[in-house]
Image (tube, grey):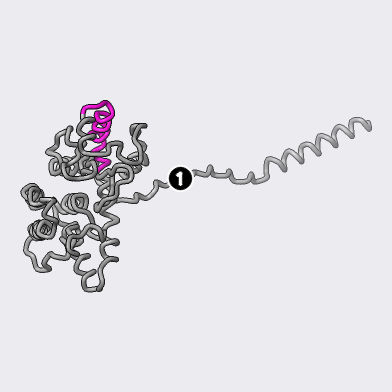
Amino acid sequence: MNNMYIKISMFLVAFVLSACATTETPPPEAKPITVVDEAPKPKYIQVAMAEAKEIGHKIWMNEGSAKVENLTAWNKGENFASLGIGHFIWYPTAQEGRFHETFPDLIVFLEQQGIETPTWLPEDAPWKSHEAFKRDKNSSRMNELRTLLEKTIPQQVQFIIQRLEKALPTMLDSLTSERKRDHVREQFYQVANSRPNGIYALIDYVNFKGEGTKPTERYKGQGWGLLQVLENMSNNADDVMTEFAKSAEYVLKRRIQNSPAQRNESRWFAGWKNRTKTYMDK
């Protein structure tokens, strides 16, 4: 009898515990945590690949007639190599020059984009002179370099755009009055907002003749960069791109007039003028 009582008691306890377990409200399911990796904000102006190729082809045409062999050049009378669609400057070891060196920065930029660059590329140009460069013209490493430069035209455009983005604050900081800063800022954005050639004209010119802020890039105290072109533009022009092209031509003429006679820079003016005309193309 006692055994039966114990069994019944145990059954009742088990039943009650079971009932409590089934009637208790279960805790809400924890929602899975989704980690969203936010894309890093671009540090430079983005353009579509097709637009970058189009702009790149124009710049390549301006600098090297869109010929592959002209992606690696060393102009006679200069002490540096000019490489890529933008003729990015590369000085030999221990060489200093008036002009800003840009090719090493381009290589760093390409590597940051995940592009493999030739392992033999040193920090300084391996050619010590124009003659040494010419002798190496058809070497395997020169062909490898041209292949890299031909395949990375859109990335070279982005590199030039990055330089443009940095140019405006630098230019404004170099000016001595708020009136001048307002004028240059206004002209910059008027050109940038002009279609279809505004962005192309700005990045081509800043690549072509620089920002105009470097003290060494002066003849007789007068520069020839983008800053000087924007400073010289009129506030009341009917056609912004025509005014930009005219101002660029004026600044380049002034450079030639101020340049040392032995450099014979007038030999380049016809090509420079043809280049500025492309800023007005419809």
Out of 185 and 121, give the one closest to the viewer: 121
Q: Considering the image in quadrants, where does the N terminus appear? A: top right
- Residue 166 is one of the magenta-drawn residues: no
Q: Quadrant of residue 198?
A: bottom left
Residue drawn at x 73%, y 38% is 18
Q: Residue furthest front?
A: 262
Q: Which residues are magenta?
A: 138-157
25 relative position to 264: left or right: right
Out of 135 and 59, give the one closest to the viewer: 135
Task: Evaluate whether residue 134 shows in this view.
Answer: yes
x then y, percent, for residue 157: 24, 44
Residue drawn at x 8%, y 47% is 271
Q: Secondary structure at mark 1?
A: loop
- Residue 143 is one of the magenta-drawn residues: yes
Q: How many marks?
A: 1
x then y, percent, for residue 225: 19, 57
Q: Residue furthest top?
A: 140
Instruction: From this view, report whether residue 202 is shown above or below residue 232.
Output: above
x then y, percent, for residue 184: 20, 65
Q: Quadrant of residue 151?
A: top left
x then y, percent, for residue 247: 10, 60
- For disc 1, the marked residue is 36
